[in-house]
Image (cartoon, coloured by chain):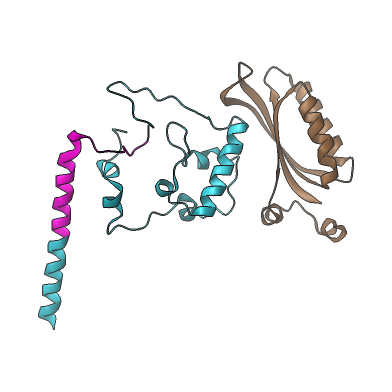
Amino acid sequence: MAAKPKRSTKPRDAARRGGKKKVSVLVSERVEYVDWKDVNLLRRFVSDRAKIRARRVSGNDTQQQREIAKAIKNAREMALLPYTSRVTTQRGRPSRDGDDRPRRPRRDESSEFEALDGDGADTAAEESTDEAVTEAAE
Amino acid sequence: MRAYELMVIVDGDVDDPGVKAVNARVVELVEADGGKVVTTDHWGRRRYAYPINHKLEGIYVVFEIATPASNLNELDRFLRLADDVVRHKVIRLPEAEAEKRGLLGEPASATD
């Protein structure tokens, strides 16, 4: 978790606002049949606790998510994928899942949000200058 | 005729002839009523994602099968009863996928 870039820990709505829609691995790699034997593919749709990633995280549409879930469950029955996988946490209370998005931001992350606000201001400034340029052109 | 995929996990303690015996029986059962085993993929020893019967690895074999559904009951029954078989799974392949892999020959679809 700590190794992940900071960007992924920002709140969901901030991540969405103005951002591009998340594209599933299935789309970007043109998978037409989700093979339940393809462990390497399926592994990318489970968290490090071996839980199936939510649709909003994986970027799947409804059909894709259903196929992935079915495939993962089949693979689990055949011991290709684990049902659970323990994640050792050293300090504090363990989070509910070892996933990369905490439900509530912790206090020590507040500085990051300020940085984010700064980002927003920057883009706003850029937009206004763009406008100025177009006006000048006209 | 329909296309299926069968995965069998043979107990890790079983020796090579034992695995061959299971494979042979599978082929025999599939061919009983006009089916056929198109490919046999021997994955070999593989570590389980979690222990099964206190064991850590098993021998995986994957078959691609084209058979009428009438064969499946007997096949399933055998696999469930066989002591050497730890787990097995039969998956019906979608038509498109079966066609891509060429599991259903043209003459077979004519008799369907």
**Quarter of image, res B12:** top right
The colour one sees for chain B in the rendered image is: brown
- Could you tell me residue A133's position as x and y percent? 12, 74
Query: Can you say whether B76 is above or below B67 in the image?
Result: above
Please state which of residues B55 and A76 is positioned toward the viewer in this rendering.
A76
Quarter that holds the C terminus of chain A = bottom left
Give the side of residue A83 with respect to residue A115, left or right.
right
Q: Which residues are magenta?
A: A99-123
Q: Is residue B27 visible?
A: no
Please state which of residues A90 and B101 is positioned toward the viewer in this rendering.
A90
**Quarter of image, res B18:** top right
Quarter that holds the N terminus of chain A = top left
The colour one sees for chain A in the rendered image is: cyan
Query: Can you say whether B16 is above or below A72 in the image?
Result: above
Find the residue positioned furthest to the bottom: A138
At a point 43% along the width and 36% down the height, the residue shown is A47
Q: Is residue A40 visible?
A: yes
The question of residue A118 being in magenta is answered with yes
- Could you tell me residue A53's position as x and y percent? 45, 41
Give the side of residue A23 with respect to residue B112, left or right.
left
The question of residue A41 being in magenta is answered with no
At a point 18% along the width and 45% down the height, the residue shown is A113
Magenta-colored segment: predominant secondary structure = helix
